[in-house]
Every structure is written in structure tokens, then in C-alpha cells.
Image: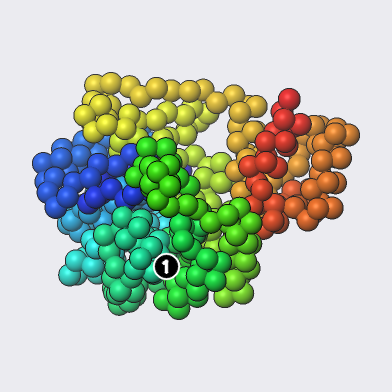
């Protein structure tokens, strides 16, 4: 089983972000205290229910988990170790942003507490792009964060980058990849910007103040960006993820393989023993659930749903999806697979269907057709 802890706070809201997170500015002490109390209650209750089942990875995501103090994060990890059966070699990841990761001694304290993977929200190493995105750190902060992470003892450090930004050129994006790789991360997550309704960037676009690069440039950014990262020694192992050998994110790989996970904190989702449930997003509503006074909504996942998800998630990855079941022998499915192979969108070998980088670029369209054919 894997454990996910959602930390729902950020210092301020980025201009593109539609995730549930509460901007706290430099305050929010009381909100954080209530959250930590609730989290401990939820953790103890769920830990007892897990009855010693081994936990192979823990992921603190958000929001901005690095907004919490090192002391609070250490004692949360200690409580997890007390109430869950963490395996010896468990991957323990935390997401953070440069402005809070750079607090003196912070990353060193995290390493001492047992965190062994750090995911840094760099997004861009271009000052103008950072301002446009509403990030509150500088490119120089990001560079210092990577240096300090290494000095603190982190060997497994991932950076998040964004591409397809307003005003960004193909050359500019490839330059960003080179600049990020020069910081020697072990992993890069590269996400294309989407303008989510209601965000300040989407409004700026609606008013004509900004525009995304044209479709053909976006396609080139994805394909040439993936090729550049491969050439730099990062394996393209999932649609948006690239890793040095042995440095794939074990936690996220678990999601894509359909492993069971328990999510704690506001808005966290869990999938265990054929049942999925999601905690409510608001702090107050979640506190009721965390303290066992309310129950989250549950959904039973039947066999068909599990198979659909296995196909969708498998095709996100370089390992692809197993082609098992009679539906794969249907003439219309075979014809579509042939079309995918002959147009260079997919490869079939050893009973698995794998999308190429070109296929990953069109994964939504490919999947929509395949799902209709396999699960009519
Ligand atoms: S730091 Fe991350 S979660 Fe927080 S507002 Fe920015 S993008 Fe959203």
C-alpha cells in the first residue's frame, strides 16, 4: 500500500493554478495547527485499520508541503512510522517550492527525519515567465534550492517544469530543459500549461492579454522536448515524466500500475480493496471526516471499471498496457491497432501496447477511441 498526505496550503495562489489550496500569506498558524491536529487523528485511525499492511511509499503533496515547519513534518513522519508498517526501503517524497525549502537548515532537517526524495516546483528558470505564472520565487532561488538539497544529502531530487507558456518559443523551451538538466536533478516532470477556467491566466487570455503558442509549436515542444531530455540521459517513462536510471518516482509508478493507496488530508483520494473514497476539500468539512464524525463518499469499483483504469493508466507509461482479453481480438480493434502502429503512434510487443512519444502527444484521442472499441 502507498500513503499520500495532502497539505492544502500555499503561500499565495499561482496565476494558473486550479488545484484546491488555501493561500495563507505569511500567517495561517491557527489553520495549520487545526490541520495538523486533524491529520494526526486521521492518521491514527487509518493506521489502526491498516493492520500492519506494509507501506512502500509515502508522498507529501499539495499545495505546498514545504510550508509546514521541519519539526511538524518530522513528527508527522514519526507518527506515520508508529502507526503504519513502513518498509525499510520506503520512498518518502515531499513536494516543495524554493521560497520555503530555502529556510535555513530546513532541507537538512527533512533528510535527517527520513525524507529521501524531494520534488521542487521550479516551473521555469526564466524570470519573466516566473512573474507571468505568479510564482513568488526567482530563478536564482531555484538554482540555490537544488544546490542546498544536494548539500543536505538529497540524492533523489526532481524538478517540475512547465512548457507551452505564453510567449515561449520552441528554442526557449529547449533552453529551459538544458538549464534545468545543468542543475543535475535525478528526475524531471514536464507539464504543458493548460488554462483552467476561472484562473487569472485564463481570464488574461480571454481578454486578449496573453495567448498560448500555436498548436504546431506546442506539438514540437512536446516531441522535441522529450527527445532532448532522452538525449540528456532522462528516460521518458510516463507522458510527463523523465528519470535518470533507477530514479523513477516509485509512488507515482504505483498509481499507474493500479496499486492500492490511502490518502489523508483534505481532498485526498483513497483506493483500497475495490472501493474509492475522497475526502472533502474544505478544511472544516474534512476535519469532521478526519475525526471520524462524518464519512466520505464511497464508490465501489467493479471489474470493468478496474480494467478500464488499468488500460488508461498503463498507456500513460513507457511499459504500456497488457493486451489481455477477447476484446483485443475483435477485427475493429485489430484494425485500429494496425493504424496506430503504421502511423508511428504505438508499438506492440510481448502482448503489450505501448504509445510512442508521438502517441503520448495524442494520448487523449487514442484512448478515447480505444476505450470505445474495447469497452463499448
Ligand atoms: S504552489 Fe502549486 S498548489 Fe500552490 S498555488 Fe502554486 S501551483 Fe497551485
Q: Is residue 276 above or below residue 358?
A: above
Left or right placement of residue 86 versus residue 271 in this view: left
Question: At which x and y percent is residue 21?
Answer: 29, 42
Where residue 45 sits: x, y (%)? 28, 33
Label 1 element class? loop
Residue 29 relative to residue 198: left or right = left
**Is residue 108 something that shows in the picture?**
yes
Q: Quadrant of residue 159?
A: bottom left
Q: Residues within 10 Å of mark 1 (few under 14, many from 20)?
A: many
Q: Which residue is more in the foreground, 235 or 260?
A: 235
Q: Name the residue at 78% across, 56% down.
A: 344
> Does residue 203 lie above or below 181 as drawn?
above
Look at 51% across and 22% down and name the residue there. 300
The residue lying toward the viewer, choosing from 373 and 87, is: 373
Name the residue that disc number 1 marks: 156
Q: How many marks?
A: 1
Nearest the camera: 272 or 82?
Answer: 272
In the picture shown, does residue 201 fall above or below 126?
above
Instruction: Report x, y in % for residue 254.
Output: 52, 48
Q: Residue at x 21, y 29 (%)?
A: 284
Depicted 75 relative to depicted 202: above or below: below
Q: Residue at x 59, y 71 (%)?
A: 228
Of residues 352 and 75, the one nearer the viewer is 352
Place residue 33 in its image quadrant.
top left
Amino acid at each position: 500500500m502507498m500513503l499520500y498526505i495532502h497539505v492544502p496550503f500555499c503561500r499565495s495562489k499561482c496565476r494558473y493554478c486550479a488545484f484546491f489550496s488555501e493561500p495563507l500569506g505569511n500567517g495561517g498558524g491557527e489553520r495549520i495547527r487545526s490541520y495538523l491536529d486533524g491529520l494526526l487523528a486521521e492518521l491514527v485511525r487509518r493506521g489502526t485499520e491498516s493492520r500492519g499492511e506494509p507501506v512502500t511509499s509515502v508522498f507529501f503533496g499539495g499545495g505546498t508541503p514545504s510550508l509546514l515547519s521541519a519539526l511538524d513534518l518530522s513528527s508527522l513522519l514519526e507518527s506515520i512510522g508508529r502507526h503504519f508498517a513502513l518498509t525499510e526501503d520506503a520512498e518518502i517524497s515531499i513536494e516543495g517550492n524554493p521560497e520555503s525549502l530555502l529556510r535555513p537548515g530546513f532541507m537538512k532537517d527533512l533528510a535527517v527525519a527520513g525524507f529521501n526524495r524531494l520534488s521542487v516546483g521550479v516551473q521555469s528558470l526564466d524570470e519573466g515567465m516566473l512573474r507571468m505564472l505568479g510564482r513568488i520565487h526567482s530563478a536564482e532561488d531555484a538554482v540555490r534550492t537544488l544546490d542546498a538539497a544536494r548539500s543536505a544529502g538529497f540524492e533523489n531530487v526532481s524538478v517540475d517544469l512547465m512548457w507551452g507558456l505564453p510567449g515561449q518559443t520552441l528554442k526557449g523551451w529547449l533552453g529551459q530543459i538544458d538549464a534545468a538538466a545543468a542543475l543535475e536533478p535525478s528526475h524531471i516532470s514536464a507539464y504543458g500549461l493548460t488554462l483552467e477556467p476561472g484562473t487569472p491566466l485564463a481570464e488574461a487570455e480571454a481578454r486578449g492579454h496573453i495567448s498560448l503558442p500555436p498548436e504546431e509549436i506546442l506539438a514540437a515542444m512536446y516531441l522535441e522536448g522529450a527527445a532532448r531530455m532522452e538525449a540528456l540521459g532522462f528516460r521518458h517513462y510516463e507522458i510527463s515524466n523523465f528519470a535518470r536510471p533507477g530514479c523513477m518516482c516509485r509512488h507515482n509508478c504505483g498509481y499507474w500500475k493500479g496499486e492500492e493507496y490511502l490518502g489523508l488530508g483534505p481532498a485526498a483520494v483513497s483506493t483500497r480493496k475495490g472501493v474509492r473514497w475522497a475526502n472533502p476539500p474544505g478544511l472544516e468539512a474534512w476535519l469532521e471526516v478526519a475525526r471520524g464524525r462524518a464519512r466520505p463518499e464511497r464508490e465501489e469499483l467493479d471489474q470493468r471499471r478496474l480494467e478500464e483504469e488499468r488500460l488508461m493508466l498503463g498507456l500513460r507509461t513507457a511499459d504500456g498496457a497488457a493486451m489481455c482479453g477477447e476484446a483485443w481480438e475483435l477485427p475493429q480493434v485489430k484494425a485500429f491497432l494496425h493504424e496506430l502502429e503504421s502511423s508511428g503512434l504505438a508499438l506492440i510487443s510481448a502482448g503489450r501496447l505501448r504509445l510512442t512519444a508521438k502517441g503520448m502527444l495524442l494520448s487523449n484521442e487514442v484512448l478515447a477511441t480505444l476505450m470505445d472499441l474495447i469497452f463499448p
